[in-house]
Amino acid sequence: MEQIEFYKAKLSYETDSWDLSESLKSAENIVVIDTRSKEAYEIEHIPSAINIPHRTMKIDTTSHLDKGKTYVTYCDGIGCNASTKGALKLAELGFQVKELLGGIDWWRRDGYETHGANATVGKEVVCGC
């Protein structure tokens, strides 16, 4: 039973590129937050993502966010923990949060479009999982 609860909890706190893409297409109450610096966001980010660097997350910098939505945080990828720091701060502020596995690195590797100065064109993605 412990294993079942662990995996259920894990899925409620994490998402992958495919599931995020599908959620965004279906207009679910999802908001994507790039938790990196403004400079990194301007270079490349996930389409529709807003930028709130984790270092600046406080009551006043998040007061415009709707607590009825789910926020998905991301950063560079597995070698970066800005998305975890941002998710923790948002959760402490009372928001429902998930973290994107692999960050923008896996988003890009999976073939999804990015925006910004180094924007990439997406391709049709077929998930094999």
Image (spheres, rainbow, N blue to C red):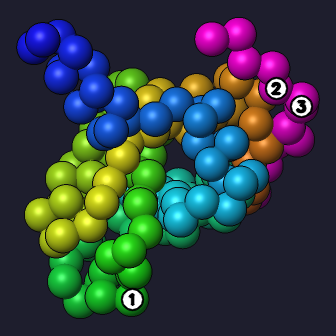
Where residue 9 appears, x then y in whole percent?
24, 31
Mark 2–mark 3 CB contact (< 8 Å): yes
Q: Is residue 59 above or below residue 98?
A: below
Please give left or right for residue 43 compared with residue 67 in the image: right
Please give left or right for residue 50 compared with residue 69 in the image: right
Q: Is residue 107 above or below residue 4?
A: below
Q: Secondary structure at mark 1?
A: loop
Q: Dot 3, crowdedness within 10 Å: few (<14), some or many (≥20)?
A: few
Q: Write down the residue under mark 1.
A: 64
Report the amino acid beneath label 3: Lys
Q: CA distance from mark 3 to mark 1?
A: 33 Å
Report the amino acid beneath label 1: His
Q: Secondary structure at mark 3?
A: loop
Q: Which residues are magenta?
A: 117-129
Where residue 14 appears, x then y in whole percent?
37, 35
Taking the spot 85% from the left edge, 37% from the top edge, the residue there is: 122
In the image shown, does 67 or 90 lie closer to the viewer? 67
Examine the rendering and report whether any part of residue 45 can be seen: yes
Where residue 80 appears, x then y in whole percent?
34, 34
First reached walking from the N terminus: tag 1 or tag 2: 1
Q: Write down the residue under mark 2.
A: 125
Report the amino acid beneath label 2: Val
Taking the spot 41% from the left edge, 51% from the top edge, the residue there is: 73
Q: CA distance from mark 1 to mark 2?
A: 33 Å
Q: Write down the residue under mark 3.
A: 123
In the image shown, does 109 or 6 lie closer to the viewer? 6
Q: Quadrant of the C terminus?
A: top right
